[in-house]
């Protein structure tokens, strides 16, 4: 808690306001509808190209200090002539910002809804840059601190970190059912006349032992490109997992299409 308070003080002195939204949509834009279709690389052959995750997000700013954020995650897995679909854990949260201090605090929960089928494998590999959306959890809550540092006239650095807690349905090795994670992201955005370009490093380290292999830490680096339209911003993203830098394994690619729609401008 002391570290989070220290970060808040530092952000207050250095950063300009940020908005609470998925990090793959148009940055710092209130009142958005965003769709993301993300396709991860799978470790085995025979998986359909159309296996992956889709995320529908909605943000609504009520005033300068309060914003509603919702997300519906979905996944599809197809291999060997069979397929399965699943709805992930929906997210609902509030973005709280201070008029006096340029700090944004996100408070959110995920409603447990995940069924047990093969689509979860695709969803877990596709949920980059967000709190865990495809986990067998009874309850999940998160607190995230956001800020933005201007670097020149067109370039900004967005920083985001915090804590998430999940009450899992299976106990850990020592009998505990709770898991703490440390979601983080650092994004460098360049705002051009026609295109928005970004480079992001995102992750979700696990701070406590998890009973499930899919609950382990994840880290990724992603490049994203968007058409800088006034209302509609289509884009693409391409990245790779970074877990191989910390343990044995291979670099796994992810790619996807994004679409952001701004309203009430």
Image (cartoon, rainbow, N blue to C red):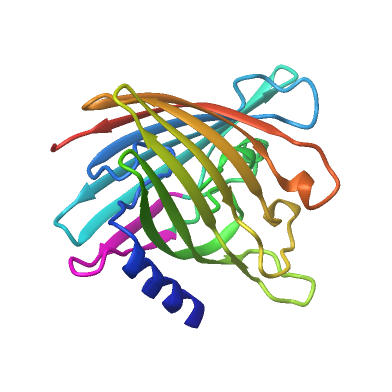
Q: Nearer the viewer, residue 97 or 186?
A: 186
Q: Position of residue 25 (x, y in %)?
A: 38, 37
Q: Position of residue 235 (x, y in %)?
A: 42, 25
Q: Is residue 244 left or right of residue 217?
A: right
> Which residue sits at x=26%, y=42%?
29
Q: Is residue 198 above or below residue 172?
A: above
Q: Is residue 40 above or below residue 94?
A: above
> Which residue sits at x=39%, y=32%?
35
Q: Nearer the viewer, residue 25 or 11?
A: 11
Q: How many marks?
A: 0
In which image quadrant can residue 144 be found? Answer: bottom left
Task: Tell me, yes or no, if residue 46 can be seen here.
Answer: yes
The C terminus - image quarter: top left
Q: Nearer the viewer, residue 77 or 24?
A: 24
Given the current orientation, which residue lies at the most extreme top position? 81
Q: Position of residue 233 (x, y in %)?
A: 32, 26
Magenta: main secondary structure equals strand
> Which residue sits at x=35%, y=35%?
34
Given the current orientation, which residue lies at the most extreme right position? 248
Q: Position of residue 248 (x, y in %)?
A: 86, 47
Residue 119 shown in magenta:
no
Task: Tell me, yes or no, if residue 1 can be seen here.
Answer: no
Q: Is residue 166 left or right of residue 71?
A: right
Q: Nearer the viewer, residue 105 or 191?
A: 191
Q: Bounds of the magenta span?
A: 90-109
In which image quadrant can residue 86 be found? Answer: top right
Residue 106 shown in magenta:
yes
């Amino acid at each position: 808690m002391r570290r989070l308070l220290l970060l808040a003080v530092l952000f207050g002195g250095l950063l300009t306001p940020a908005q609470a939204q998925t990090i793959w949509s148009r940055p710092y834009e209130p009142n958005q509808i965003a769709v993301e279709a993300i396709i991860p690389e799978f470790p085995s052959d025979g998986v359909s190209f159309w296996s992956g995750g889709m995320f529908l997000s909605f943000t609504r700013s009520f005033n300068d200090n309060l914003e509603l954020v919702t997300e519906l995650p979905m996944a599809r897995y197809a291999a060997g002539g069979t397929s399965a679909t699943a709805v992930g854990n929906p997210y609902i949260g509030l973005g709280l910002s201070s008029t006096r201090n340029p700090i944004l605090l996100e408070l959110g929960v995920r409603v447990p809804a995940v069924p047990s089928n093969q689509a979860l494998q695709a969803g877990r590999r596709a949920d980059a840059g967000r709190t865990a959306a495809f986990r067998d959890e009874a309850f999940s809550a998160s607190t995230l601190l956001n800020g933005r540092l201007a670097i020149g006239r067109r370039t900004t650095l967005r920083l985001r970190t915090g804590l998430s807690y999940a009450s899992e349905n299976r106990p850990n090795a020592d009998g505990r059912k709770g898991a703490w994670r440390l979601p983080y992201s650092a994004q460098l955005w360049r705002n051009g006349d026609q295109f928005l370009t970004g480079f992001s490093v995102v992750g979700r380290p696990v701070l406590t032992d998890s009973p499930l292999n899919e609950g382990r830490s994840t880290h990724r680096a992603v490049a994203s490109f968007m058409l800088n339209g006034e209302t509609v911003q289509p884009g693409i993203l391409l990245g790779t997992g970074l877990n191989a830098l910390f343990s044995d394994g291979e670099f796994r690619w992810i790619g996807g299409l994004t679409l952001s729609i701004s309203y009430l401008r």
